Amino acid sequence: MTDIKSLTKDELTDLIKGMGEPGFRAGQIYDWMHKKQARSFEEMTNLSKSLREKLSEECEFVSLKIERVQESKIDGTRKYLFELGDGNLIESVFMKYRFGNSVCVSSQVGCRMGCRFCASTIDGVERNLAPSEILDQIYSIMRDTGEKVSRVVVMGSGEPLDNYDNVLTFVKLLTDENGLNLGQRNLTISTCGIVPNMKRLAEEKLQINLAISLHASNQAKRQELMPIANKYSIDELLDACRDYFDKTGRQLTFEYSLVGGVNDTDGDADELADLLKELNCVVNLIPVNPIKERDFVESTGERVQSFKKKLEKRRINATVRREMGRDIDGACGQLRRRHISEKHDGN
Ligand code: SAH
């Protein structure tokens, strides 16, 4: 069955014409799915009943089911656990900022990158998400909250550049003027550093932002935290970053999770400043969110501030990520793991 919500408008037009319907029907259907966030063909009331029935027979209509929502009492962050058509579970996060609302989406069920401090990767990857399944995380949250979404980050579970084609289709659908029409500059993709696909992305002539999970200031330390560093060296990674900036002109974001006693000394900050000094970038410092499966501890508040000051003295822009939703298993993959283990215990 065709996953209709994953089709571009041109592909949808071909499908509809192939059914013997006039081309403008495709525009109506696309509008229902991507502008009005319809949840089924039934809602598409300007289509004939027979066409709606035909569509239901021939197409799959992806609409995620909310399995669980947790709202932070601290900052109103809402963490969603969605059930996919095949029963798999994924997480997304809705965050309210002064400048607008953000949604953080997952790109895979699980992840195979193996970063040492991350809960999403512990059981490996189950499968890639379809474009429709990435999109509908946003649509479902918009319907549930009744709020607009002005920024999207692909920073949930999974490695977006390990699911390149589907993520790219998702980007096209989300930023399409016939759909939600999110500005490309309001969309960020976060990668652990799959170098060849970073280069491919740079060639796509898009204006989306790239965030790179760096987490270390040299090759040896990065290898200890992130297995992907064994495949692509930190030098190759930084070359790909420079290439992305040269081709797109977009400022880069480096994510750096501060792990107590591992990568958070002033010496580490100095080395990081050396590494990044030629790049137009900002460093986003994230005190590591401890997960129960690993014994990493977060850096002290004092250490975080000292690290930030050191970078700033070296003229590197640095921000400390506001910790949102700490009280609701905010770190990647934590809610899903807890939910699954609770269900197991209950059975
Ligand atoms: N695979 C992508 C996107 C998902 S992870 C990537 O690696 O960038 C989003 C960010 O959260 C990454 O920077 C990741 O390294 C970081 N992260 C994961 N678990 C974390 C934890 N427990 N504490 C702090 N940061 C974490």
Image (cartoon, rainbow, N blue to C red):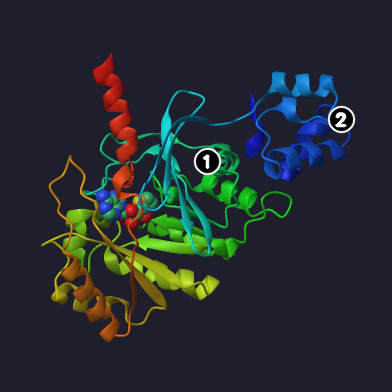
Residue type, mark 1 in image: Gln
* Image coords of residue 260 (percent x, y): 14, 60
* Image coords of residue 342 (percent x, y): 28, 25
Report the disc number at residue 40: none
Q: Helix, strand or loop at disc 2?
A: loop
* Image coords of residue 241 (percent x, y): 41, 69
Query: From the viewer's perspective, is 202 left or right of 193?
Result: right
Q: Helix, strand or loop at disc 1?
A: helix
Query: From the viewer's perspective, is 34 left or right of 84?
Result: right
Quadrant in the picture for residue 217: bottom left
Report if residue 242 is visible in the image: yes
Query: From the viewer's perspective, is 286 left or right of 50?
Result: left
Q: Mark 1: give few (<14), some (14-19) or many (20+) Cα within 10 Å.
A: many
| Residue on which the image places disc 2 | 21
- Comparing marks 2 and 1, which lies closer to the viewer? 1
The foreground one among 195 and 26 is 26
Whether the residues at callouts 2 and 1 have beta carbons within 8 Å, the answer is no
Quadrant in the picture for residue 221: bottom left
The residue located at (37%, 62%) in the rendering is 212
The residue located at (35%, 67%) in the rendering is 254
Which residue of the protein is positioned furthest toward the top in this rendering?
Answer: 347
Position of 248 relative to 133 (above/below): below
* Image coords of residue 76 (percent x, y): 43, 49
